[in-house]
Image (tube, helix red, strand yellow):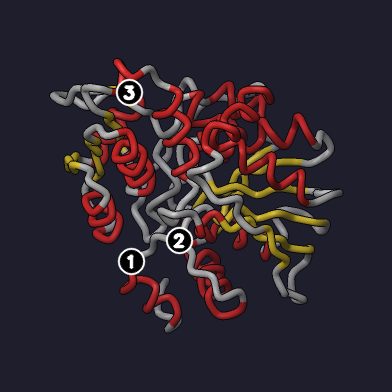
């Protein structure tokens, strides 16, 4: 786990850059549990990624970031790094996978980032190896960087400070950096609370790995849930996830689309696919019957996709 003092230090370091996001009760009487939403979709870049990116950049010595900052991202971490790099006055280069959501790519460039397109396999390799071939600069790993995880952990601090008697926290899983940070904070401040990762059925390697007791790869299928899920668990993240989590659960594409729709219609909140995973799991009863916090990790969804979901067309 990430030490609690490092998470608290991160909170002090990034306090002027990030929003202490609302934790609000969802009116969902049909739900099997009491649902609370941690609305990270309201951050300045529309995603929690600003926390870890800002902590990583501000923690680094000036001489390390002077040549520029590099990351690999489906879009949201790229925005976080571009935002932090712009603040620091250095160049950001972001490697994105083929098929990356155009709205996210546009946002990276609007924030001053330079975008490099890679195949999905090359992009995942860049995350695993913490480098992008031919690009110089400090690589901020969106998953495996402890400074990023400490920044992410500030979400967990806010949750346990604002709400008592939490039974479960549900967190969407991409590579594991978000859930490791949050679980580290929650387990050290509210030990009785369980933390579960949520994956889409089209890309759920952690669930399969927990079932097998060792890291497993799965057949990755792309979907509108672009900010979560992968084909495998990174080897360096496996022991962290084993230590920090109480398990992982899987939801369907249809359940996730329904959660996006419910958030928009009932809570007036726009969430991307990954951001709605935790609510989909709560509504399905996968977080139990008690008090459940759902981390709505981001809201950077393509407007055309959102329109289809709201019209009930997404399958």
Residue situated in front as seen by the camera: 277 or 233: 277
Residue 300 placement (x, y as % from top left): 39, 60
Residue 89 placement (x, y as % from top left): 27, 34
Identified at 76% across, 50% down, the residue is 162
Identified at 59% across, 24% down, the residue is 240
Mark 2, secondary structure of its residue: loop
Identified at 66% across, 25% down, the residue is 243
Horizontally, residue 74 falls left or right of residue 252, namely: left
In the rendered image, which quarter is residue 101 located in?
bottom left
Q: Nearer the viewer, mark 3 or mark 2?
A: 2
Which callout, 3 or 1, points at the residue further toward the start of the chain?
3
Residue situated in front as seen by the camera: 280 or 57: 57
Residue 237 placement (x, y as % from top left): 51, 25
Q: How far separated are the C-alphas under marks 3 and 2?
A: 26 Å
Residue 19 placement (x, y as % from top left): 55, 51
Horizontally, residue 31 falls left or right of residue 152, namely: right
Q: Is residue 20 above or below residue 57?
A: below
| Mark 1 Cα shell of 10 Å, populated few (<14), some (14-19), many (≥20) | some
Mark 1, secondary structure of its residue: loop
Which callout, 3 or 2, points at the residue further toward the start of the chain?
3
Callout 3 touching callout 1 (CB < 8 Å): no
Q: Which residue is mark 1?
A: 302
Q: Is residue 73 above or below residue 284?
A: above
Horizontally, residue 236 falls left or right of residue 167, namely: left
Q: Is residue 283 above or below residue 220?
A: below
Q: How far separated are the C-alphas under marks 3 and 1?
A: 28 Å
Q: The C terminus is located in which quarter?
A: bottom left
Q: Is residue 217 above or below residue 308?
A: above
What is the total number of numbered labels drawn onto the structure image? 3
Q: Which residue is mark 2?
A: 299
Q: Which residue is mark 3?
A: 130
């Amino acid at each position: 786990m990430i030490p609690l003092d490092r998470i608290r230090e991160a909170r002090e370091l990034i306090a002027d850059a990030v929003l202490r996001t609302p934790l609000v009760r969802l009116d969902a009487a049909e739900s099997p549990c009491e649902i609370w939403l941690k609305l990270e979709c309201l951050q300045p870049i529309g995603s929690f990624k600003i926390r870890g990116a800002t902590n990583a950049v501000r923690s680094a010595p000036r001489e390390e970031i002077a040549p520029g900052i590099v990351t690999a991202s489906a879009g949201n971490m790229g925005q976080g790094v571009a935002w932090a790099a712009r603040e620091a006055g250095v160049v950001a280069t972001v490697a994105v996978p083929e098929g990356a959501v155009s709205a996210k790519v546009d946002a990276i460039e609007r924030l001053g980032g330079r975008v490099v397109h890679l195949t999905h396999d090359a992009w995942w390799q860049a995350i695993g190896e913490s480098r992008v071939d031919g690009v110089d600069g400090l690589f901020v790993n969106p998953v495996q960087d402890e400074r990023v995880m400490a920044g992410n952990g500030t979400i967990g601090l806010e949750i346990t400070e604002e709400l008592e008697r939490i039974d479960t926290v549900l967190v969407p899983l991409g590579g594991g950096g978000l859930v490791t940070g949050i679980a580290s904070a929650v387990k050290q401040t509210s030990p009785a609370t369980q933390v579960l990762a949520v994956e889409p059925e089209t890309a759920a390697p952690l669930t399969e790995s927990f079932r097998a007791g060792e890291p497993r790869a799965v057949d990755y299928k792309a979907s509108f849930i672009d900010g979560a899920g992968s084909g495998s668990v990174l080897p360096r993240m496996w022991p962290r996830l084993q230590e920090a989590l109480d398990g992982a659960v899987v939801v369907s594409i249809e359940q996730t689309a329904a959660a996006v729709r419910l958030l928009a219609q009932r809570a007036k909140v726009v969430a991307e696919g990954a951001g709605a995973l935790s609510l989909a799991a709560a509504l399905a009863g996968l977080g139990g019957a008690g008090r459940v916090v759902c981390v709505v990790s981001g809201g950077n969804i393509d407007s055309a996709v959102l329109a289809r979901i709201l019209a009930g067309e997404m399958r």
